[in-house]
Amino acid sequence: MSAQPDERRGVPSASGMQRIVNCPASFRMEQASYAEPESKDASAGTLIHAVLAGLANYDDLTPEQQQTCDMCEGAMDRAFRDWAGGGAATLTQKEVRLGLTVDGRSIVVTPEETAEFVFTGQYDRLCIIGDRAIVMDTKTGRGDYEAAVDNDQLAALADLVHLHHKVNHVRVVLAQPWRKNGVTVADYTPNIWPIVHTWLIDSVHGAMNATPDQTKEGPWCKFCRAKLGCKTYNHRLNQNLEVVDPLRISGLAPKEQGQAMWAILMEVSPERLVAAVNGLPFHKRFIHAVESTFMARVEAGEIPGYQIEAKPGNREITDAQAAFNALQPLGITSDDVLAACKLPLGAMEEAARKASGIKSQTPGRTTYNLTAQQAKDSVNAALEAAGAIGRKAEGRQIVRAESAIKEK
């Protein structure tokens, strides 16, 4: 049986639009790079999107994932109501990928479609009323994304929707329920389409024909598979390392290296230290990329002398009641067990939801009388009333004041 074609068809995609606009060479560089293993947060986001699209079971989500799913659904519902003005959608679609063909058409990308594409993009939800459409994209994490009015991904999706559905008024919505003021919108009107389409074509053409010197570092590097081999990215890393004079301390033992770094950093100028702090995200991404790529290539058998071995997991009690029965002869009391227990709030909130009773049930989703947020609020209220909940000791963090030193 032949393999299914890549849904992105090997061409630039809307999800990477911010990166290819700012760093045109990254598209070709990514094609020659290894795919990094999906992170835990990314896997959770993929599963939540599948549930929102009706392609996965809501009950398979963790309590926190269910809360995120409910928040995303609620944000999209409110955005639709605000836009629709009481009207009903004549068409609603979820998780559909459109593609721009070489002859300028925007068509649905399916495994069977044989057209030659130059660009594709997938929206989370689309609703149409007459000559108007609303395109929604949800972000399940807490990361920073450009607001809808400046969002390159949404601009590209708007153009694909305009061309495919022949609608001239398109509202785009970015919903980030975990962020304060997490829903932003932008409206595209008839006079803007020639500008948007020209921008999209120029951006795609630039990415397909970019030269290696057209790289530029920035926030878009975070999700770029090519960063390990990128000279521009590594130059930024090296700039940050230069502050501790690596040649000077390279021969020291690990403990002495740490002491030397501390001493050097205590002497650098405030401006240089601010620049180093601003560069820390690059180092964290670099470390993650090295570790994940190394793991992938060891698993593929490409690195002699290394192999993947399973390691035993930590011990855990799988049946609390059976464990208590077994421990009683040792003199362990129920008070001892309760004192040793650390009740996870998420699990308690999920138990409260289930105890509230089932409002409705479908093959893909169980809806309880309490939403995830309502269960959280009720558990918090009960524990606060009993004086059984508090917060851990306050941490300390640095925030940038208006008068903070600016990076030079």
Image (spheres, rainbow, N blue to C red):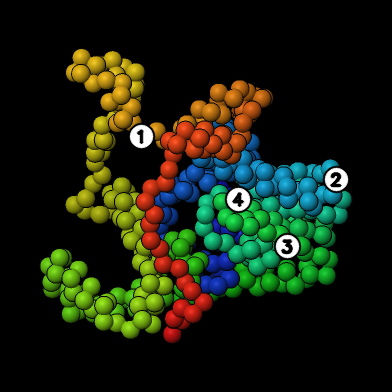
Q: Does residue 64 sit above or below 140 in this rendering?
A: above
Q: Earlier in the sequence, mark 2 or mark 1?
A: 2
Question: In 3D space, how far apart are the residues under numbered discs 4 and 3 (Cα atoms)?
Answer: 17 Å
Crowd around label 1: few <14 · some 14–19 · many ≥20 (10 Å): few
Of the image marks 1 and 4, the number of the one nearer the N terminus: 4
Q: Amino acid at mark 2?
A: Gly
Q: Secondary structure at mark 2?
A: loop
Task: Tell me the residue at 21%/53% (across/down).
Answer: 304
Q: In what element is the residue under mark 3?
A: strand
The amino acid beneath tag 3 is Ala
Residue at label 1?
342
Residue 211 on image: x %, y %: 50, 76
Seen at 20% across and 14% down, the residue is 329
Q: Which residue is mark 3?
A: 186
The residue carrying mark 2 is 86
Which badge, 2 or 3, is on the more N-terminal residue? 2
Give the SS element for disc 1.
loop
User: Do labels 4 and 3 touch, CB within 8 Å?
Assistant: no
Q: Is residue 98 left or right of residue 191?
A: left
Between circles 2 and 3, the one closer to the viewer is 2
Tag shown at residue 177: 4
Q: Mark 2–mark 3 contact, CB under 8 Å?
A: no
Amino acid type of disc 4? Pro
Give the number of the mark in front: 1 or 3.
1
Neighbor class of circle 4 (other Cα within 10 Å; few <14, some 14-19, many 20+) is many
| Type of amino acid at the residue the image marks with label 1 | Lys
